Image (cartoon, coloured by chain):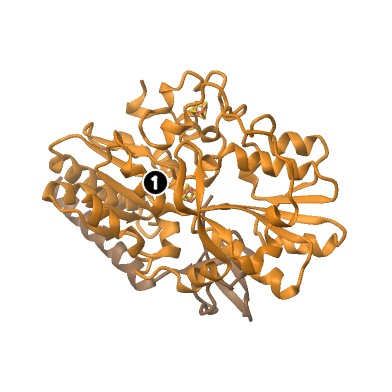
Chain colours: A brown, B orange
Amino acid sequence: MCLAVPGKIVDKQDMLATVDISGVTRKVSLMLLPEAQAGDFVLIHAGFAIQRLDEAEAKKTLELFKELEKYAELDA
Amino acid sequence: MQSLTPEEQRRTAGFFTTEISHRVKRPLRLMEVCGTHTVAIFKAGIRQLLPAGVELVSGPGCPVCVTPNEYLDTAIAYSRQPNVILTTFGDMLRVPGSSSSLLVEKAAGADIRIVYSPLESLDIARDYPDKQVIFLAVGFETTAPTAAATVLTAARADLKNFSVLSSHKLVPPALQALLDRPGVRVDGFLLPGHVSAVIGVEPYRFLQRNFGIPAVIAGFDPLDILQSVYMLVRQLEDGAAKLENQYSRIVPAAGNPAACKLLEQVYQPADTVWRGLGMIPSSGLVLRPGYSAFDSRSKLPVVVEPASEPKGCRCGEILQGSIKPTACPLFGRSCTPDHPVGSCMVSVEGTCAAWHKYGAGRWQL
Ligand code: SF4
Ligand code: SF4
């Protein structure tokens, strides 16, 4: 039930955002994430943006995975 | 992660599974608390990738599964009232109550509408000023703030014909209650990422402090899950019991303060009954007295039939991770996703439903 999907805010009008979720646009409430801005990637649950995607942290995870990929290669 | 090629993903997964195999020296039981994890684990075949000594068991991770019959019976009683429109997330429709389900009531003419967002209930309330609109407010910490925001919006708009039938539940008290039970053996927890996106890291600290159990807040991609299992295994083999956050790209340490504040403003903790786990102190949320005008139970009292449990269903043990679905005599026989007897077969995130759909892999009995 707490399924949540990422989307990108393309427009913000007060507490209402238009988000692009894999090519589909939807209106979502920003009442739970008032600081979100146009351009942000957010996690959307039940019509509300509930969290922002931290791009620096996302990059860290990705870099870790890339590093491990090299390691796995050496190991093989 | 989408930005890795399939080949890179395969190799990274290979790294984690090899490391896990090298490190595991004794049988481990790791519990994923969240039904979304359960489904991701089955879909990606993660159980089959792990060495035989690492067992993944599902816990009480789906609000649909843990909603007791008494709540459904109350919702059904409301749906039978004239001039009531029930709004609900789709998952709740097929959950069997003591003697009916919302789907059966809907077919019989009850006005029950599926909403994607609780806010849609307010539009319905505006469109039907002569009817009472009741939103079935079910869900964990991820979902409860969306209901709180809806109640607040209704209060600001002074909407008099909207209320919520609240059955929100909190994850940390349930974990505590589970661990307090004799006979429950869990070596480590994969904690629910989207619940944590709201509550943050600290509410789980007791796992480490009171129980010495390692825990990792985990994301939902197969590599996130494998990395989280690897982090747990590493802790267990080092004799550590830490609280780690694998999903930091979505879960900041403080969670979502605006959502928590709204939740706190509208709701207060209360004792509540979980299917299979019984009453757990302070594990539910009820509206604060200032919002009682939006509380269906106090606003529109209704007579509810006495609740009874389905015969033979073993959801209680499933939700504690103490048996596998195949141990239930009804599994795949009288209980299937098309004709669920118990709630764990209803939600796509339910443990019985996941086993039925994806098979049990290496764990098939
Ligand atoms: S309701 Fe939330 S915590 Fe439960 S299974 Fe679904 S996603 Fe996970
Ligand atoms: S198989 Fe059906 S009856 Fe048995 S425990 Fe699961 S949901 Fe309950």
Residue B222 visible here: no
Query: Which of these two is toward me, B274 or B279?
Result: B279
Q: Secondary structure at mark 1?
A: loop
Mark 1 residue type: Val
Residue B300 pos. (x, y %): 75, 53
Residue B147 pos. (x, y %): 61, 61
Residue A10 visible here: yes
Indicate yes or no: mark 1 CB to ligand 1 under 8 Å: yes
Residue A64 pos. (x, y %): 25, 61
From what the image shows, is residue B364 above or below residue B166?
above
| Residue at numbered disc 1 | B33
From what the image shows, is residue B343 above or below residue B202?
above
Give the residue drawn at x 49%, y 58%.
B141
Chain ID, mark 1: B
Residue B39 pos. (x, y %): 45, 41
Give the residue drawn at x 27%, y 64%.
A63
